[in-house]
Image (cartoon, rainbow, N blue to C red):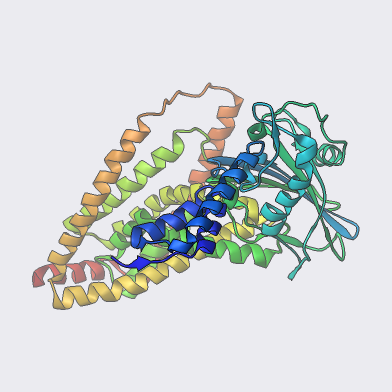
Amino acid sequence: MAVTRVPPRISLRLCIESSLKPGAGKERLGAVLRSRRVILPRRGHMRLGWSVLFALGLLLGLTGTVAGHEIPPSVMVLAFVKPEGQRLRMLLRVPLESMRDVDFPLRGPGYLDIPRAEPLMREAAHVWLAGYLSLYEGDSRLSDGRIVATHVSLPADRSFVSYDSAFAHVTSARLDARTEIFWKQALLDVLIEYPIVSAASRFSIDPALARLGVRTTTVLRFLPPNASERAFEYIGDPGLVRLDPRWHQAALRFVSLGVEHILNGIDHLLFVFCLVIPFRRLRPLVAIVTSFTVAHCLTLIASALGYAPSGLWFPPLIEVLIAISIVYMALENIVGPRLERRWAIAFGFGLVHGFGFSFALRESLQFAGSHLVTSLLAFNVGVEIGQIFVLLLAIPALMLLFRYVVAERMGTIILSALVAHTAWHWMTDRAGALRQYHFSWPAFDAVLAANVMRAMMFLLIAVGLGWVLSAGVRRLAGAGAVSEDWGRGASRT
């Protein structure tokens, strides 16, 4: 075991750190003790004694303050952003306990000493809030914000329901010094101002406030001049949020989301993989993938516009149907697919997968600004880019596999059986989750009649698109040619 001599100066620093920041000094000292055998110099014994006494005295002197505390499990941040004239104001409300490593003075059994805590609140707001906020006017980052006011609020305070009431509350007189509020229940309200060129500019924000808690939820409301309020709600750090995006900015964001979703959605990838296992020629692939694309684009847009059922049972039902689609497609590969069936089945199941895409997209539509349709189409483009990328990898891999490793018919059966096995487990698990929901038939009223009419219109549109696709499929590739290719592949086995 290695031996390390620790100078008294270091031991003193570790003692002080362990008293000021519980856990920090202990971790560093513990790492040394675990890795090495520590021997203090003889002449340092007296200094070590003074160090320990100093640390104990410091601890005794801190009995009237809040020691450094753990990360809160859940934090809710309320925020307003409003440009006015030559300045941009940002109002924030956070739990006081999220301001970690700040020793707020207390009195009695743990009540916040408000007058003595005020200077520390301004410093905490600068370190934990203003220091992690980046705001942009156009493409230019704004200079560091100035903390104009801080205010301690009771947990029952409702002033942050609107910007005007929140601003009036933050800039009002502080709570009475005799107010008894337990420090963990207190709320910290902060007003920050940034200099800007014009209130009519387009603004963006990169809020890195996830560090405030284990799970940090932010509700941000932007109040542009001469326009309606826009609300955002997100968990963690969303990255750069354009509060009033241009159409091309929204499109780029949603193209990226589409690519990310298809590459992270293993169930959608397995379905696409099953589609192309037996059909690797270009013309059949174009027919199949196009029908799947048109179908999921249709239901994705319909769901985003509010034409999907709103019951809690609907998303679990779609998840079950997605698993069923993979099982069915894999089993058809084993039995023997035909193009005249494959494109139609891909179209039908594409309608189901479109609803699945919409569930993942629902929380992101708030970042579309006023460009909803553009963002939906851009998301579909991103999904197609992801699918093409997967196909470019899968098709050559399948060709090499069937040429050098296993015969095409046997390889198709093996791969499809593995996919079917995986999807079968998904189907049973998701069906179990679906059974936990209670389904009740809706009342027969005008609302139901309107929903039925919407559904019929949607079905008519889907049938019309299917008819158009059927004509295109017949021109792209004849079913007989594909069947011959499949038969030759089967005979080679």
Quadrant where the C terminus sits is bottom left
Tell me the quarter of the picture where residue 131 sits.
bottom right
Residue 395 against residue 66 in the figure, above or below: below
| Direction from residue 172 to residue 236 in the image, left or right | left
Q: Count the marks: how many?
A: 0
**Residue 343 pos. (x, y %):** 35, 59
- Residue found at the very far right of the displayed protein: 85
The residue closer to the viewer here, 105 or 139, is 105
Q: Residue at x 12, y 71 (%)?
A: 407
- 405 lies above or below 90: below
Vertical position of residue 382 compared to residue 236: above or below: below
Residue 433 placement: quadrant: top left
* Nearer the observer, 297 or 268: 268
Give the image location of residue 342, x and y in percent: 31, 58
- Residue drawn at the location 35% of the way across and 57% of the way down: 34
Instruction: Choose top left, top right, bottom left or bottom right for residue 336.
Output: bottom left
Left or right, 127 with respect to 481, comes to right
